[in-house]
Image: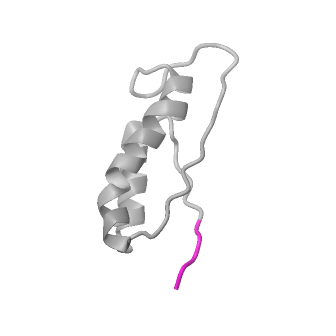
């Protein structure tokens, strides 16, 4: 059975992204990943990791999440 789910996470935090990946993989293999995220901050903000927030949310988080989920995606194909 395939189903979609919403799992909220602070994508400006790399630790939160790692926790999110763990929550996804806890249920077993994945068959698909739709990874769409975007943010734009009017002034510079740093993430909890000390990284510029727009870069962290728009580039680092999706890349890290995809890398962490690759084993589960490969297992689900």
Out of 32 and 14, give the one closest to the viewer.
32
59 to 23, vertically: above or below = above
Q: Is residue 4 magenta?
A: yes
Horizontal and vertical percent for residue 25?
Answer: 36, 65
Q: Which quadrant of the view contains residue 30?
A: bottom left
- Residue at the spot x=35%, y=69% of the render? 26
Residue range of the region highlighted in magenta in the rendering: 1-5
Q: Position of residue 53 (x, y in %)?
A: 53, 25
**Figure coloring:** one colour
Q: Is residue 52 left or right of residue 18?
A: right
> Considering only vertical position in the picture, is 10 above or below 12?
below
Q: Quadrant of the C terminus?
A: bottom left
Q: In the shown orientation, is residue 57 left or right of residue 74?
A: right
Q: Position of residue 62 (x, y in %)?
A: 47, 42
- 1 relative to 60, above or below: below
Q: Main SS type for the magenta part?
A: loop
Residue 43, percent from left and from top: 65, 13
Q: Is residue 61 magenta?
A: no
Q: Quadrant of residue 24?
A: bottom left
Residue sitting at the far right? 42
Report the number of discs: 0
Residue occupying image coordinates x 41% and y 20%: 50
Which residue in the rendered view is the most extreme toward the top? 43
Residue placed farthest to the bottom in the image?
1
Judging depth in this view, the residue of 16 and 34 nearest the camera is 34
Q: Is residue 47 above or below residue 22?
A: above
Q: Quadrant of residue 23?
A: bottom left
Between 62 and 8, the one lying in front of the other is 62
């Amino acid at each position: 059975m395939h189903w979609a789910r919403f799992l909220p996470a602070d994508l400006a935090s790399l630790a939160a992204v790692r926790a999110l990946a763990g929550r996804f993989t806890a249920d077993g293999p994945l068959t698909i990943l739709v990874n769409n995220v975007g943010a734009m901050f009017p002034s510079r903000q740093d993430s909890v990791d000390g990284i510029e927030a727009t870069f962290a949310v728009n580039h680092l988080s999706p890349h890290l999440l995809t890398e962490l989920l690759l084993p589960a995606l490969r297992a689900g194909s």
